Amino acid sequence: MSDWYDSIEEPIRDVVKLLRDNGFNTMNSCGHEMTIECNHFLNGESKRLYYLVYDYLKNNNKEIKFSISTHSYFDNNTISHTLIIRFPENQHKLERLYDIRDQWKMHLEDVEKLIKEYK
């Protein structure tokens, strides 16, 4: 891979390269959230995108779980359409981290109450 691809976060890098090599213009990607944003394209291409991602996951023995959603943005009388591809694999980990954080917050609140009682 070229140096440009090295700047993309590791968990999502191969998929970004695959999409770009197959004519899909990616605009943004995040390895932590496992998302890729690309330019919207004609409806006929959505099936090709679906099978491209599906085959990639299957051929790399990864869980076949992803979503493709369309977003329209309106800014200064300009409409732009993008697609967001999400791989929920890390989403579960992120939700678990939020749960752990919330549990620690509750414990810290309890500790603060105990400290106040002992003062």
Image: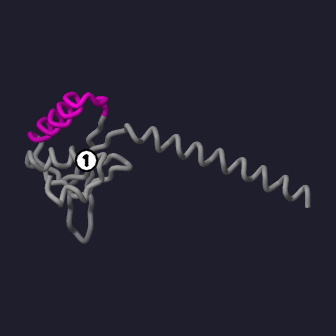
Which residue has dot 1 on it? 70
The percent position of residue 9, horizontal first and vertical second, equals: 30, 53
Q: Is residue 73 above or below residue 32?
A: below
The image shows residue 51, relative to residue 2, as above or below, that is above
The residue located at (21%, 45%) in the rendering is 14
Residue 118, by quadrant, is bottom right
Is residue 7 or residue 34 the one in the foreground?
A: 7
Q: Quadrant of residue 75?
A: bottom left
Residue 57, image x, y percentages? 23, 32
Residue at screen point 20% across, 32% down: 54
Return the x and y of residue 29 as percentages of the image width and height. 28, 54
Inspect the image, locate mark 1, and give the three-letter code of the amino acid beneath it: Thr
Helix, strand or loop: magenta stretch:
helix
User: Dot 1, how many residues are within 10 Å of its Cα: few (below 14), some (14-19), or many (20+)?
Assistant: few
Residue at 45% x, 38% y: name it: 92
Q: Is residue 77 left or right of residue 108?
A: left
Residue numbers of the magenta segment:
44-65
- Which of 23/70 is in front? 23
Q: Where is the C terminus found, in terms of image quarters? A: bottom right
> In the rendered structure, does residue 113 fall within the stretch colored magenta?
no
Is 64 left, or right, of 118 in this rendering?
A: left
- Asked which colour scheme the image uses, the reply is one colour
Tell me which residue sits at (8%, 49%) in the image.
23
Say which element carries label 1: strand
